[in-house]
Image: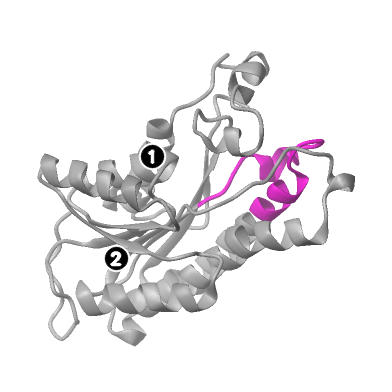
Amino acid sequence: MYRTAKKGVENKMTQPILLITGSSRGIGTATAFKAAQKGWHVVINYKSNETAALTLQQRIEEFGGKADCIQADISDPEAITTLFEKIKTKFGLLSGLVNNAGILEQQMPFTESDLDRWHRVFNTNVIGTMLCSKEAYKHMSPKHGGNGGAIVNVSSLASITGSPFEYVDYATSKGAVDTFTKGFAKEVASENIRVNAVRPGFIETDMHATGGEPERVKRLAPSIPMQRGGTADEVANAIIWLLSEEASYTSGTFIDVAGGR
């Protein structure tokens, strides 16, 4: 994965730089560690859990990889702008972005949810993903001095199933991410920027506890063709492949990591 910067490009390192939003837990953490193993200089973004982010950084450095932590709330447009400016100033131009930051709220039927909740979910899951992608474009586009790159959006199989009676607003936000992935991929393909997405199914992470049911995956396992939930590492494997040169002719597409659902 090591690449040499082109002449005249503002890169401070030969290692490709990868930003993973919301990478202090779950899928983001697994992806960060695997990316570091593949030679990426990983920028660990976190909203509030500095301890988890620093622990991940230490783990990567003990392995011999390169990582740095930057705090930013992906629901805040100004924080996103500052995040990307810090990366460019401190490390150079990004070659990769994983839009992993995402939230859901307590399980409930859609008719019991309210506008404030929808705004919170969409501000992070949709607007945050779109703004981060726009800022990453400024790093990657040859028009701005970049060398191209790869963006992977973490969507959800809920964008297809709709997640009725639990997370319709979350599922709707991920449907928007899917549409954005398709459209943005076509816009930037000629600039050597690839945009893809993974759609995890029921994955064993602490996100389910956030929604109010820590054992949700166990309850739903019988409905999964493979009869089990997935792991964060299994999702990370798909993300890493989409970031890699092995996926050099893949853009605007999706990998469902959902046990056959």
Determine crowd level at label 2: few under 14, some 14-19, many 20+ residues with C-alpha closer than 10 A. many
Q: Is residue 229 part of the magenta span, yes or no?
A: no
Rendering quarter of residue 118? bottom right
| Residue 242 image position (x, y, % from top left) | 38, 49
Determine crowd level at label 1: few under 14, some 14-19, many 20+ residues with C-alpha closer than 10 A. many
Pick the front one: 228 or 45: 45
Tell me if residue 53 can be seen.
yes
Q: Which residue is mark 2?
A: 95
The type of residue carrying mark 2 is Ser
| Residue 136 image position (x, y, % from top left) | 40, 72
How far is disc 1 from disc 2 in space, using C-alphas?
18 Å
Q: Which residues are magenta?
A: 154-175
Residue 155 lies left or right of residue 26; in this view the side is right
Pick the front one: 151 or 42: 42
Helix, strand or loop for disc 1? helix
Q: Quadrant of the C terminus?
A: top right
Q: Earlier in the sequence, mark 1 or mark 2?
A: 2
| Residue 219 image position (x, y, % from top left) | 66, 17
At x 59%, y 17%, the residue is 218
The type of residue carrying mark 1 is Ala
At x 28%, y 52%, the residue is 245
At x 40%, y 51%, the residue is 49
Q: Which residue is mark 1?
A: 236
Q: Is residue 169 part of the magenta span, yes or no?
A: yes
Residue 227 lies left or right of residue 14; in this view the side is right
* Image height of 211 relative to 144, above or below: above
Pick the front one: 166 or 105: 105
| Residue 157 image position (x, y, % from top left) | 63, 39
Rendering quarter of residue 29? top left
Pick the front one: 61 or 227: 61
* Image height of 53 relative to 163, above or below: below
Q: Residue furthest right?
A: 111
